[in-house]
Image (cartoon, rainbow, N blue to C red):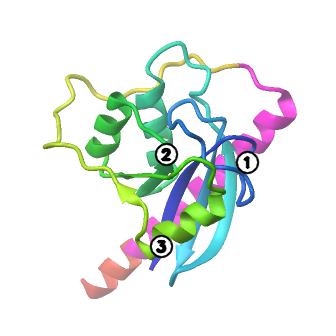
Amino acid sequence: MVERIAVASQGIGGLEDYVSPVFARCNSFTIVEIENGSIREVTTISNPSKLSPSGAGIQAAQFVASTGSRVVIAGNFGPNALTALSYMGIKPVTSPYGLKVEEAVRRYVEGSLQTLRIGPQIALPRPLQVPSFAPALPKDREIAMLKARMGFIKRRLKEIEDRLRELEEKG
């Protein structure tokens, strides 16, 4: 089974980047797919909420959910981000300061990173929505980010189609 993990990254992302000490306003996310304990695929995406004037925690949580990640690793999480992640069924995991993304993922797979637990799921007063405001990006970075997001969507759609086919065959 494939497990998708989002790692808040300090720089442009990737296995050699460092885990960001913050979640919501990290520079980028490194999305790592793990299969049978080994890294299968790595994608980096700029964090669209890093410059948001407000609500960055909820926006970042929604963005991570849109990648299909069920786990997110960062140095620290704010209370709004934790609530949103819990609401979406995404497991927040903390990483010690100074770890590279690859090392943090390895430690997560080994079970040596701390999973944050918050109280009972809090019902949010309104549906989570990302505001229409988005910081302007250089054209080449926006194209790269959109292509990466499109790749995620295509992989997610294939997963859904495969699951539907499987369920229909069992019919």
Residue pictured at 49% horizontal, 35% vertical: 60
* Span colored in magenta: 136-163
Three-letter amino acid code at the position of disc 3: Val
Residue 85 is left or right of residue 36, and the answer is: left
Residue to which mark 3 is pinned: 109
Residue to which mark 1 is pinned: 147
As helix, strand or loop, the secondary structure at mark 2 comes to helix
Residue nearest the viewer, comparing 42 with 164? 42
As helix, strand or loop, the secondary structure at mark 1 comes to helix
Residue to which mark 2 is pinned: 64
- The answer to whether mark 3 and mark 1 are in CB contact below 8 A is no
Q: Which mark is residue 89?
A: none
Q: Quadrant of the N terminus?
A: bottom left
Residue 89 is left or right of residue 18, and the answer is: left
Q: Could you say where residue 139 lies in the image, as x and y percent from the top left?
A: 84, 29
Give the CA distance from mark 3 to mark 1.
28 Å
Give the CA distance from mark 1 to mark 2.
16 Å
Would you call the spot at circle 3 few (<14 residues within 10 Å), some (14-19), or many (20 or more)? some
Q: Could you say where residue 72 lies in the image, as x and y percent from the top left?
A: 46, 52
Q: Could you say where residue 157 lies in the image, as x and y percent from the top left?
A: 51, 61
Q: Earlier in the sequence, mark 3 or mark 2?
A: 2
- The answer to whether mark 1 and mark 2 are in CB contact below 8 A is no
Q: Earlier in the sequence, mark 1 or mark 2?
A: 2
As helix, strand or loop, the secondary structure at mark 3 comes to helix
Front: mark 1 or 2: 2
Within the magenta stretch, is there residue 160? Answer: yes
- The answer to whether mark 3 and mark 2 are in CB contact below 8 A is no
State the image quarter where residue 164 is shown: bottom left
